[in-house]
């Protein structure tokens, strides 16, 4: 019995195993409480779709050796900007969504490129620096949101007539445009097939890229930069490619997120988003040095199911206080902490 | 009066993961004696020193057998602190000096003189204040003993290397109960005049009754100061000479000597072809620890050329420099054409391949499959094992099937023990990892294969396989091989010629059948001064 | 050999002047920004100075507690928040016991100590497992600990920990209120002895306590313990071979920092007068780190002077930015965003500069050893 437990721990790692057990307990509790189980599953799927691309964004940066991308907020901001532009152009529906995505790509590419130039000079300290650079840029952007010359009345503050609002609604534009794509009803509920398909397509593209010559070079750069240099691979160049793709996915990811959520959250919104994505991929079994698409899928499923199911279940158990939120903080940060102890040098 | 025995080692044995590095060494050092310990690399000198000084690496790998006696009492040394308490001091090869501290603070590191204050009486001795004045007095004394006149409150950063070496020594002699002082290759980084000063200081210390154990490969120094000399070879003590008996030749021969077991190989037909495939002129390589200063030699097509020499003398730097892994200058011509240095990609494009001595550091992608390890370099530089995506040449995709086939072939041909081509190389044994590295080099279809330390860290059985493989490549495929190794034995067993490197230059080139004395003298740099003819 | 020495010294002198300029570039830049800010805010100096003294009184001890871990090579202690939470636990305790005034304050400090010691040891153990990544670890550990704190104060109070006082417990009976009134100890330290110099009110006892801690830090650095810290801060491996208990010393360093942070938070709150149970401590780590960096400290070097200078400059910025933002751009909010940007930006820049310095030094070391080979 013990050796089977050890084998499972060795294969999947402590966090994943414990969280799965916790999840199972939660589900059982939910059933006992007679919660709307189908509804909960449907909500989980919606949230999984919503967050999926942001988690996928972690793969290229980890694979290329830059580690966990705490500066994903840079890509997120590019996505938000592109989204605002699509609204300013008074676009609606699927074309608006695609415009936002397409506009975000060059912005993300350029910022990702510039940022990687910095990151390549601080190898070994990427994580701490990315965290603070990310936060600094979010704050700088907060000033920019106030000053940028947007005119659309949906986005501007009613009083003052200048500066973007904190939250910008997508109702009537492309709210749920992917979610509602291919209206499949399952037990009376909408399953967001569109979003999942979109995510699947991006996964496929990334998978394809990893199987290319450049993808192989990138994996080598991440696994062992010295090997890569000796094999004539330009490590810095491939780290840059990884960061650029990660930033682009961050931009696309926030647009996917917003269409499902229904709102663009500006200003301090992107501040903690990288952490959520990082916890998810770590939960899925990735480490700071190695990540695969399967980590993304299992991680985002586990994390979002946990959040969705824990909220009503735990609140019913203990209506006082925001216990589910507290659990989220503990799980989210605990997972990252655990991953760090695996990276760190304890002699 | 019979001098007191300070250190006695009885039958010291040590194994590292099944590999016996010390096979029963006996050593005695008396008070006031300078005892030199000589031997090739891998002979076991450093391991012996680590045991005496209680270094953590010994205890974390299974401890050792045998007894250590200090002043006639059998003792256990479980940590460097124990060693220090027992009166054993060590002057390390890599300085253990803190650059931001002054000379005095380094001399007194973790042995600072303290005095009580109000808080320390309540909260404990670690809060005692430093008595800087008393510390400076002591360190001035130690510096005087070594004949050093320098401001003891200067920070270490920025001092010349010779000064730093002396501060290392001052730190040891400041320890009041110093009975035995071990010097590990102390003159390796010193200039000639600094080295002379060091030997002077050593004699002075011995004169004060301290026993000195002195590891070196510079035979002239040994003859200059040693009272007694112990020669280690392959973990065994093969000679004990006194100052009167010793000559450079005798020591050299003992150092190198013929192994009882030899790796048997068919006597190779001497390669008739004298066609030169590569010619190296005035090569200089900036590889930290293995500097190449000025090396010129030629490689004959189809031969197995060995490059040997003691550690740190530069042999490892040669291949690393030619392959572009470290900054190099000089002229390297291949088939008459000058090749570009400092560019790993060009080196490979010029049909050179390299199996690095740093298997895990440079040679492998540990968290990647065997098959990817094998084809990676070839894929990136030679564009092999690629397929265009949907016919579009711009998108080159990995040829998964081709890679799998080749992976399987390599595993079969080189007999790599694994669960399959998809297994991560981290899981393989040292020998099999080495084979993966060789497979990767072979995939490049090179004209010249450089191999460094091919059998390092591999068990005996696998060693033979790797060497056999190299011979096979040479005989059956006509591949020119340049093999760098610290193990003279293996060089002599398969090479056609062997070049010995000393202090960054070629000391000479010998036939594998040359005498032990010749090899020993070359490795110790004494050959050229004895003008013997090369065979 | 002597000419070699001279050459090296000359090279170092030059290097030193450049070094000083680079090292002090951050405070110099901030002087400029602060002057600009003071001018733009159009606030009067008397108000600014009074606010400044107040903020120094509140924050200096927290900033000072960052110094020892930096000396011991553990980088910037972003887990300062953990010590702050221990301090808050002390305050909650005296609220429950209903002890006010100076005795209450001292009691709070006393009660906070065992918590801070425990938390400090825990923090140290985790940091020892992640040598080389201490800063990101302490950052995440801080968040994690905040989660645990919320668990205890939101959910265990009133249930597992039997507390019924309606003044502090939420209406539901479970969980500490969002704001706990601390008027009964507010200004207790400050009011003991106040001086009025040119219209600026100075709380003398608080200042004296801060000065006491400055001396305490200097004292520690000059003891055997301090010497061990300094050795660790330079090279862990060499310290280990010399026989220093690396892990233990690091534990002690972080624990000292945590205890000082606990008292620092208590001093902060005795001046504010209200405990925002779930948010008073949130930004503590970030603001303290930003402050000391503004003063010119780096990941590997921090002095008392830098702590004081940095806190002064950083808080001047805090005081003037809302008004400056309003006057320049018509939006006070902008000033606040600018403030946050500065705080994050200073830390980010320091981290980057430190990383650059590390590589430059490693390169120099490699070049030096090459030169010696000749």
Image (cartoon, coloured by chain):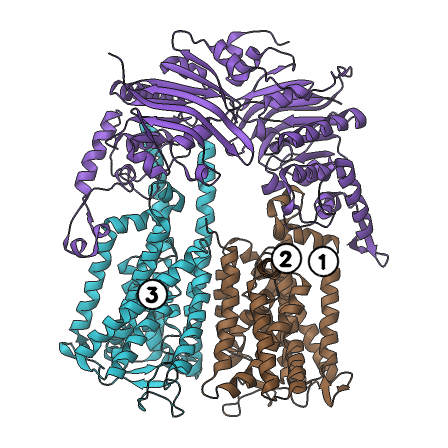
Residue at mark 3: C118
What separation in Å lies between label 1 and label 2 (alpha carbons)? Answer: 9 Å
Which lettered chain is shown in cyan? C
Q: Chain ID for label 3? A: C
Residue B293, label in figure: none
Which lettered chain is shown in brown? A
Q: Chain ID for label 2? A: A
The lab-note entry on whether marks 1 and 2 share a chain reads yes
The residue most toward the right is B391
Residue at mark 1: A210
Residue at mark 2: A63
What separation in Å lies between label 1 and label 3 (alpha carbons)? Answer: 47 Å
Query: Is residue B143 positioned above or below B26 on the image?
Result: below
The lab-note entry on whether marks 1 and 3 share a chain reads no
Query: Is residue B502 positioned above or below B62 on the image?
Result: above
For numbered disc 2, what is the local secondary structure? helix
Which lettered chain is shown in purple? B
Asked if the residues shown at circle 3 and circle 2 are in contact, with their CB atoms under 8 angstroms apart, the answer is no
Q: Chain ID for label 1? A: A
Q: Position of residue B27 (x, y in %)?
A: 40, 20
Residue located 60% across and 71% down the image = A20
Q: Reading the chain from its start, which is encountered first: label 1 or label 2?
A: 2
Asked if the residues shown at circle 1 and circle 2 are in contact, with their CB atoms under 8 angstroms apart, the answer is yes
């Amino acid at each position: 019995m013990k050796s089977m437990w050890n084998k499972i721990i060795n294969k999947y790692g402590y966090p994943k195993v414990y969280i799965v057990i916790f999840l199972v307990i939660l589900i059982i509790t939910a059933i006992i409480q007679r919660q709307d189980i189908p509804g909960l599953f449907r909500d989980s799927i919606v949230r999984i779709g919503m967050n999926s691309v942001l988690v996928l964004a972690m793969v290229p940066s980890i694979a290329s050796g830059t580690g966990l991308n705490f500066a994903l907020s840079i890509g997120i901001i590019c996505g938000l900007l592109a989204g605002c532009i699509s609204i300013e152009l008074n676009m609606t529906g699927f074309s608006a969504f695609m415009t936002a995505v397409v506009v975000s790509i060059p912005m993300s590419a350029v910022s990702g490129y510039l940022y990687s130039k910095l990151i390549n000079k601080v190898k070994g300290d990427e994580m701490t620096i990315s965290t603070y650079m990310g936060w600094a840029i979010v704050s700088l952007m907060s000033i920019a949101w106030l000053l940028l010359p947007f005119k659309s009345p949906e986005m501007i503050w009613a009083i003052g007539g200048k500066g973007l609002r904190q939250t910008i609604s997508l109702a009537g534009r492309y709210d749920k445009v992917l979610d509602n794509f291919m209206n499949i009803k399952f037990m009376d509920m909408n399953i967001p097939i569109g979003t999942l398909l979109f995510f699947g397509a991006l996964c496929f593209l990334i998978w394809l890229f990893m199987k290319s010559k450049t993808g192989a070079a990138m994996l080598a750069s991440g696994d062992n930069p010295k090997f890569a240099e000796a094999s004539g691979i330009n490590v810095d160049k491939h780290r840059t490619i990884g960061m650029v793709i990660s930033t682009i996915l961050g931009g696309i990811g926030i647009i996917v997120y917003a269409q499902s959520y229904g709102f663009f959250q500006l200003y301090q919104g992107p501040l903690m988003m990288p952490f959520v994505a990082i916890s998810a991929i770590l939960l899925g079994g990735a480490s700071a040095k190695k990540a695969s698409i399967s980590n993304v899928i299992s991680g985002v499923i586990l994390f979002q199911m946990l959040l969705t199911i824990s909220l009503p279940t735990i609140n019913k158990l203990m209506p006082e206080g925001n216990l589910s939120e507290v659990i989220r903080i503990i799980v989210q940060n605990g997972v990252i902490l655990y991953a760090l102890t695996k990276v760190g040098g304890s002699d | 009066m019979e001098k007191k025995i300070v250190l006695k080692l009885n039958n010291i044995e040590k194994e590292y993961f099944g590999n016996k590095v010390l096979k029963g060494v006996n050593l005695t050092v008396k008070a006031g004696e300078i005892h030199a310990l000589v031997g090739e690399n891998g002979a076991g000198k450093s391991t012996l020193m680590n045991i005496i000084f209680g270094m953590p690496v010994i205890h974390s790998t299974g401890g050792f057998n045998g007894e250590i006696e200090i002043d006639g009492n059998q003792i256990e040394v479980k940590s460097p602190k124990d060693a220090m308490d027992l009166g054993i001091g060590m002057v390390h090869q890599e300085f253990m000096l803190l650059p931001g501290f002054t000379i005095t603070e380094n001399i007194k590191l973790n042995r600072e003189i303290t005095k009580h204050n109000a808080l320390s009486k309540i909260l404990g001795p670690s809060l005692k204040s430093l008595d800087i004045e008393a510390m400076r007095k002591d360190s001035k004394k130690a510096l005087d003993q070594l004949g050093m006149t320098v401001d003891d409150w200067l920070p270490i950063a920025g001092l010349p290397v010779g000064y730093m070496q002396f501060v290392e020594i001052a730190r040891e002699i400041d320890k009041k109960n110093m009975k035995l002082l071990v010097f590990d290759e102390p003159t390796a980084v010193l200039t000639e005049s600094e080295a002379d000063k060091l030997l002077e200081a050593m004699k002075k210390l011995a004169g004060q009754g301290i026993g000195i154990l002195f590891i070196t490969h510079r035979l002239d120094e040994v003859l200059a100061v040693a009272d007694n000399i112990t020669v280690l070879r392959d973990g065994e003590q093969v000679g004990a000479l006194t100052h009167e008996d010793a000559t450079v030749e005798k020591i050299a021969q003992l150092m190198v000597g013929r192994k009882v077991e030899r790796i048997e190989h068919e006597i190779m037909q001497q390669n008739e072809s004298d066609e030169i495939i590569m010619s190296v002129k005035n090569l200089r390589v900036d590889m930290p620890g293995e500097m190449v200063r000025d090396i010129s030699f030629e490689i004959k097509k189809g031969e197995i050329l060995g490059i040997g020499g003691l550690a740190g003398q530069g042999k490892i730097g040669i291949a690393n420099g030619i392959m572009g892994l470290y900054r190099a200058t000089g002229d390297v011509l291949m088939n008459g054409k000058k090749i570009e240095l400092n560019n790993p990609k060009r080196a490979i494009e010029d049909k050179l391949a390299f199996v690095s001595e740093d298997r895990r550091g440079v040679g492998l992608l540990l968290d990647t499959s065997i098959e990817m390890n094998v084809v990676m370099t070839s894929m990136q530089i030679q564009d092999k094992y690629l397929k265009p995506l949907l016919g579009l040449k711009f998108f080159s995709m990995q040829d998964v099937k081709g890679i799998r086939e080749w992976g399987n072939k390599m595993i079969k041909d080189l007999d790599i023990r694994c669960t399959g081509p998809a297994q991560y190389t981290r899981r393989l044994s040292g020998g099999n990892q080495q084979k993966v590295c060789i497979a990767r080099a072979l995939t490049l279809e090179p004209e010249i294969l450089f191999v460094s330390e091919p059998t390092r860290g591999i068990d005996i059985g696998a060693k033979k396989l790797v060497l056999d493989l190299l011979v096979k490549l040479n005989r059956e495929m006509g591949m020119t091989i340049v093999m760098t190794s610290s193990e003279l034995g293996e060089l002599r067993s398969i090479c056609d010629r062997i070049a010995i490197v000393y202090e960054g230059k070629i000391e000479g080139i010998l036939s594998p059948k040359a005498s032990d004395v010749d090899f020993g003298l070359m490795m110790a740099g004494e050959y050229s001064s004895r003008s013997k003819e090369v065979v | 050999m002597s000419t070699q020495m001279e050459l090296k010294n000359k090279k170092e002198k030059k290097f030193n002047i450049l070094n000083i300029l680079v090292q002090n570039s951050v405070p110099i830049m901030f002087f400029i920004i602060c002057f600009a800010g003071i001018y733009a805010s159009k606030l009067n100096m008397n108000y600014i100075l009074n606010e400044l003294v107040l903020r120094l009184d509140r924050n200096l001890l927290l900033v000072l507690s960052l110094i020892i871990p930096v000396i011991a090579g553990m980088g910037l202690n972003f887990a300062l928040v953990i010590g702050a939470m221990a301090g808050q636990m002390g305050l909650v305790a005296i609220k429950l016991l209903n002890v006010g005034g100076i005795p209450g304050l001292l009691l709070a400090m006393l009660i906070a100590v065992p918590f801070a010691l425990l938390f400090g040891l825990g923090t140290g153990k985790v940091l020892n497992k992640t040598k080389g990544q201490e800063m990101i670890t302490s950052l995440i550990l801080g968040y994690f600990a905040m989660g645990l704190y919320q668990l205890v104060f939101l959910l265990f109070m009133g249930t597992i920990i039997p507390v019924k006082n309606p003044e502090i417990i939420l209406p539901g009976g479970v969980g500490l209120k969002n704001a706990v009134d601390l008027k009964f100890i507010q200004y207790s330290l400050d009011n003991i002895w106040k001086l009025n110099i040119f219209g600026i009110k100075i709380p003398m006892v608080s200042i004296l306590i801060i000065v006491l801690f400055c001396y305490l830090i200097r004292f520690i650095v000059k003891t055997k313990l301090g010497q061990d810290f300094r050795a660790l801060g330079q090279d862990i491996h060499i310290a280990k071979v010399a026989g220093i208990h690396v892990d233990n010393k690091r534990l002690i360093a972080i624990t000292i920092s945590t205890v000082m942070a606990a008292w620092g938070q208590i001093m902060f709150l005795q001046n504010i007068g209200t405990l925002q149970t779930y948010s008073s401590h949130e930004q503590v780590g970030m603001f303290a780190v930003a402050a000391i960096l503004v003063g010119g400290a780096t990941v590997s070097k921090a002095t008392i002077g830098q702590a004081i200078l940095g806190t002064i400059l950083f808080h001047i910025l805090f005081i003037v930015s809302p008004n400056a933002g309003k006057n320049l751009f018509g939006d006070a909010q902008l000033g606040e965003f600018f403030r946050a940007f500065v705080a994050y930006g200073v830390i980010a820049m320091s981290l980057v500069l430190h990383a650059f310095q590390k590589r430059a030094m490693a390169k120099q070391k490699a070049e030096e050893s090459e030169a010696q080979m000749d």
